Amino acid sequence: MGLPYRIGAGLAGGDWEEIRTILERCSEEFGMEIELYRLNRDRWGDGSR
């Protein structure tokens, strides 16, 4: 499953370490691989233009 890096943290206010732990547990429990994707702002811009 692909998810945005730091999903639920940042603007959402979640604790990334707790979220990461939950994702790791879910991955193990359900036998699925989770890929985290980080936006490369140099390529896509930061939306401020």
Image: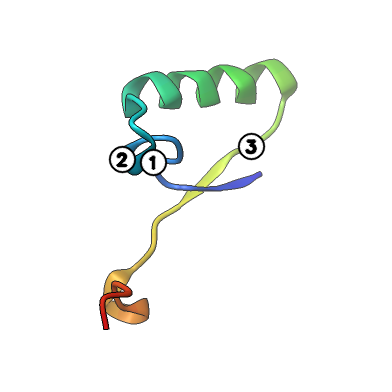
SS at circle 2: helix
Above or below, 39 against 11 in this view is below
Alpha carbon separation for disc pair 1 and 2: 7 Å
Q: What residue is rendered at 68% in x and 15% in y? A: 29
Looking at the image, which is closer to me, 46 or 22? Answer: 46
Q: Name the spot of residue 40 as percent of width and height, x first.
A: 34, 68
Alpha carbon separation for disc pair 3 and 2: 23 Å
Amino acid of disc 3: Glu
Q: Are marks 1 and 2 in contact (CB under 8 Å)?
A: yes
Residue 42, picture quadrant? bottom left
Q: Name the spot of residue 5 as percent of width and height, x first.
A: 42, 46
Alpha carbon separation for disc pair 1 and 3: 16 Å
Image quadrant in which the C terminus is located: bottom left
SS at circle 1: loop
Closer to the chain start, of discs 1 and 3, is 1
Residue 7, picture quadrant? top left
Image quadrant in which the N terminus is located: top right
Q: Residues within 10 Å of mark 1 (few under 14, many from 20)?
A: some
Residue position marked by numbered label 1 in the rendering: 6
Amino acid of disc 2: Gly
SS at circle 3: loop
Residue position marked by numbered label 2 in the rendering: 10
Amino acid of disc 1: Arg
Q: Nearer the viewer, mark 3 or mark 2?
A: 2
Q: What residue is rendered at 33% in x and 23% in y? A: 17
